[in-house]
Amino acid sequence: MKGRDYASQIVASREAHPLPPHLRACAEVLVRQSLQLLFPHFGGAPTCELSAVAQELRQLQRLVEETVSSVIEAARAPAVATAFVAALPAVREALLADAEAL
């Protein structure tokens, strides 16, 4: 029966999938929070206080660490999260340049 063979292929594919099921949802939250931090119009009412923005950066770094720790060696996650946050100024500038080019 072809339907059963195809179903078996799907099951095998799902079992071989190396990424945890929750990763997509985590990635979506990570992208949304990154955009809200970099570009306030992606979020609600942004705060303009330095301490609040610093807190947002810390929260984002923790989120990156939690997200990547499910797909890489947990001991490497803090360094990856630190590098991610450190790259945000360059990412923001590149996105702004792309927007201006349009």
Image (cartoon, rainbow, N blue to C red):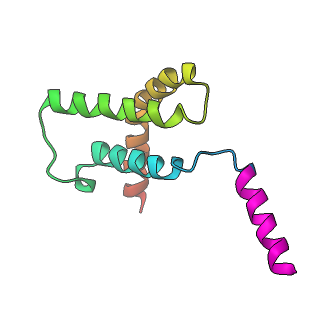
**What secondary structure is the stretch in magenta mostly built from?**
helix
Quarter holding the C terminus?
bottom left
Q: Nearer the viewer, residue 12 or 18?
A: 12
Q: Residue at x 38, y 57 (%)?
A: 99
Q: Which residue is drawn at 85% across and 72% down?
A: 5
Q: Residue at x 38, y 42 (%)?
A: 92
Q: Nearer the viewer, residue 95 or 4?
A: 4
Q: Position of residue 45 (x, y in %)?
A: 14, 51
Which stretch is magenta?
Answer: 1-15
Quarter holding the N terminus?
bottom right
Residue 65 part of the magenta-drawn span = no
The image quadrant of residue 49 is top left
Q: Residue at x 63, y 45 (%)?
A: 19
Residue 12 part of the magenta-drawn span = yes
Q: Measured along the vertical axis of the image, is residue 82 above or below residue 29? A: above
Q: Where is residue 90 in the image (x, y as percent from the top left)?
A: 42, 36
Q: Position of residue 96 (x, y in %)?
A: 37, 49
